[in-house]
Amino acid sequence: MAKVKAPRNRTIQLSDEEKLKFKERLFSIHSKAGKEQVVNKLLTQDFFECADWLPENSVDLLFVDPPYNLTKKFNSVSFREMDFNEYLNWVDGILLKLKRTLKKTASVYFCSDWKSSSAVHLALSKHFKVRNRITWEREKGRGAKKNWKNNTEDVWFATVSDNYVFNVESVKLKKKIIAPYRDENGDPKDWREGSEGNFRLTHPSNIWTDISIPFWSMPENTEHPTQKPEKLLAKLLLASSNVGDVVLDPFAGSGTTLVTAKKLQRNFIGIEKDEYYSMLALKRLELAETQKSIQGYDGEYFYERNSFPQLRRKKI
Ligand SMILES: C[S@@+](CC[C@H](N)C(=O)[O-])C[C@H]1O[C@@H](n2cnc3c(N)ncnc32)[C@H](O)[C@@H]1O
């Protein structure tokens, strides 16, 4: 039986019946696989076991959100903190295995916290052209007595070559105008008037303060301890892939990348070692057949955190 939840708690859980249903659907590969065998599939197995069997030259966008360099338990999967060079080699090993799966035009996004960020940067620059580091504000974080509260994470952006997709128009941020300035003719300067208020469409920068970590009253929330927000994935997928492209997530967790890819008409390949998280991901993928909205995105523009609530219409 799923745990009893508070009335507004929308956390996705699995009932005993659903556990049986999704367990039957768990899938894995045990030899070289063609694209048709793994596209739009979640493989429930160890990444290091199956990476060499993934099809070559087939991925347009790689999103890697591995365990950060911290001792942590992900349900049945444990990760042990390493020294800097050991973690650097571990990250390098992931990239070495994945490189051959990428198309020449592919983009790579790699997540880290402040501590593992320099290892990720070093490893990425060995294999790819590093183009940027996005820092996003987590909003949640535990205060420290003798340190600054750790409230940000990084996502490194790299590409295989100089020929890559970047759809900047798809990831514009709709920002409220506080001081609407008009030119000598009385026309708005770089902003627009709308029934919902005055706003400006801004180019997305490499610091993101409009993201909320999934929490219990959000419909995307699961029991996964380090779930990424769909809005974060939506920005990366819209900017760095096109409809019909293949997105690979080798540490898929609760399936955020796969679900967002599905909502945005991209294809996906996911890998997750833990069976329970895989089953949660399968449930989210099933829910995404009818629930296509992404919080903070209206199908055209992204919104600042907690802004324009009346505009959260569901176009997609
Ligand atoms: C940081 S979490 C990813 C969270 C995910 N982005 C989400 O939104 O839910 C890392 C995941 O990698 C999985 N993992 C760790 N080692 C793995 C391995 N060797 N192969 C496959 N999955 C692994 C863990 O079980 C965990 O769910």
Image: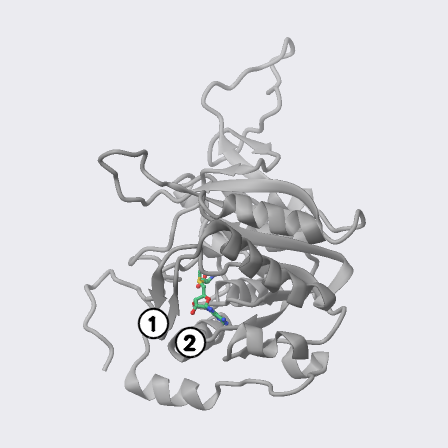
User: Can you tell which quarter of the image residue 5 is in?
Assistant: bottom left
Residue type at mark 2: give it.
Answer: Asp
Residue 97 is at least partly visible in this image = yes
User: What percent of the width, then of the height, locates residue 178?
Assistant: 45, 22
User: Can you tell which quarter of the image residue 227 is in?
Assistant: bottom left
Tell me how far mark 1 sits from mark 2, CA to CA.
Answer: 7 Å
Comparing 309 with 204, the one in front is: 204
Circle count = 2
Q: In the rendered image, which residue does mark 2 sit on?
A: 274
Viewport quadrant of the N terminus: bottom left
From what the image shows, is residue 147 above or below residue 16? above
Viewport quadrant of the C terminus: bottom right
Q: How is the image coloured?
A: one colour
Residue depicted at x 45% and y 60%: 67
Comparing 88 with 199, the one in front is: 88
Mark toward the start of the polypeptide (1 vs 2): 1
Number of the label disc, if any, that sits on residue 314: none
Residue depicted at x 31% and y 65%: 11
**Label 2 near label 1: C-beta < 8 Å?**
yes
User: Can you tell which quarter of the image residue 181 is in?
Assistant: top right
User: What percent of the width, then of the height, locates residue 40?
Assistant: 61, 76
Numbered disc 2: secondary structure: loop
Q: Is mark 2 within 8 Å of ligand 1?
A: yes
Residue 4 vs residue 166: left or right? left
Numbered disc 1: secondary structure: loop
Q: Is mark 1 within 8 Å of ligand 1?
A: yes
Near mark 1 (Cα within 10 A), the count class, few <14, some 14-19 or many ≥20, is few
Comparing 46 with 246, the one in front is: 46
Q: In the rendered image, which residue does mark 1 sit on?
A: 75
Residue 73 vs residue 199: left or right? left
